[in-house]
Amino acid sequence: MKTIEINESVYKKNEALAGILKDNLHEKNKKLINFLGSPGSGKTTLLESIIKTIDNPKKIAVIEGDLYTDKDAKRIEKLGVKTVQLNTKGACHLEAGAISEAINNLDISEAETIIIDNIGNLVCTAEFDLGEDMRVAVMSVTEGNDKPLKYPLMFQTTNVIVLNKIDILPYTDFDLDEFYKDIKDLNPNVKIFEVSATKGYGVAEFCDYLTNFK
Ligand SMILES: Nc1nc2c(ncn2[C@@H]2O[C@H](COP(=O)(O)OP(=O)(O)OP(=O)(O)O)[C@@H](O)[C@H]2O)c(=O)[nH]1
Ligand SMILES: [Mg+2]
């Protein structure tokens, strides 16, 4: 009897599509950045803050991933940034094929960087390569400093961690020393930014990094 490993074939197909997408975008000199993290960690607020901070927001285009609504896409579109909504109808992650389709429906003529505002999820989203040049895990201090060890794949596969909601750190039991120690064990080369997306702390530094990375 023939046995088909569904998981393996799904990942292989996704990987192949992600590779093609990456090559296509590089040919056009465009960068793709993937924002991941738990629901409510502040991914969309951070995007809003970036758009308000950078010199020319037209250099950014956004793919919004959501299960059902277009609430986040409307928030970004309101700021004059080209945006496309992807609804997964309940699925907990995005795949590279859907990102290619979204880009085909997005005006990226002026954009140098396309940012994916991924579905709020600390597990499945980390498993899928979307052809991105950079992963940014957005984590907030209200989630607790134990999350990197509890959800290691997210923090091992990311290039950058944005530790958000730093404005309310004193009102939480988030242990910064433990957080840095755990991250050093999991992903020693990761770049970490302490940010408040609502107050704007650290956002300019993060924007510099986003716009200048090669
Ligand atoms: N105090 C504080 N609140 C923040 C900050 N960033 C975001 N928030 C709040 O956190 C809540 C969730 O923010 P969102 O940006 O919608 O979170 P998200 O990660 O996009 O959530 P999903 O799209 O559901 O995955 C909102 O009420 C924001 O105002 C911050 O830096 N400080
Ligand atoms: Mg959001």
Image (cartoon, rainbow, N blue to C red):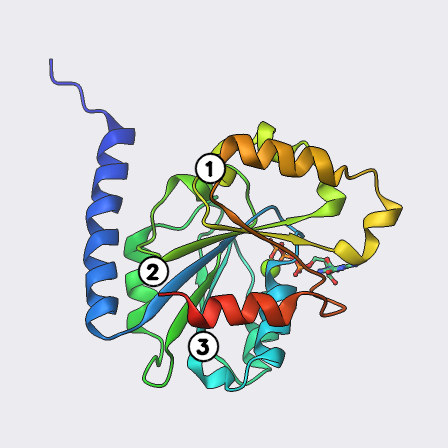
Please report the residue visible at 59 percent of the width from the left and 82 percent of the height from the top: 79
Between marks 2 and 1 in the image, the one whose residue lies nearer the viewer: 1
Task: Determine the secondary structure under disc 3.
Answer: strand
Disc on the earlier residue, 2 or 1: 2
Task: Determine the secondary structure under disc 2.
Answer: helix
Please report the residue visible at 25 percent of the width from the left and 30 percent of the height from the top: 8
27 vs 92, left or right, is: left
Q: Position of residue 189 (x, y in %)?
A: 47, 43
- In the figure, 136 relative to 155: above or below? below
Find disc 2 in the rendering and name its residue.
99
Please report the residue visible at 19 percent of the width from the left and 24 percent of the height from the top: 4
Q: Quadrant of the N terminus?
A: top left
Q: Please indicate, yes or no, whether residue 119 appears anywhere in the rendered image.
A: no
Find disc 1 in the rendering and name its residue.
156
State the residue lying farthest toward the right. 171
Find disc 3 in the rendering and name its residue.
60
Please report the residue visible at 74 percent of the width from the left and 67 percent of the height from the top: 198
Disc on the earlier residue, 1 or 3: 3
203 vs 111, left or right, is: right
Give the amino acid type for the residue marked by disc 1 in the picture. Answer: Gln
84 vs 198, left or right, is: left
8 vs 214, left or right, is: left
The dot on residue 107 is: none
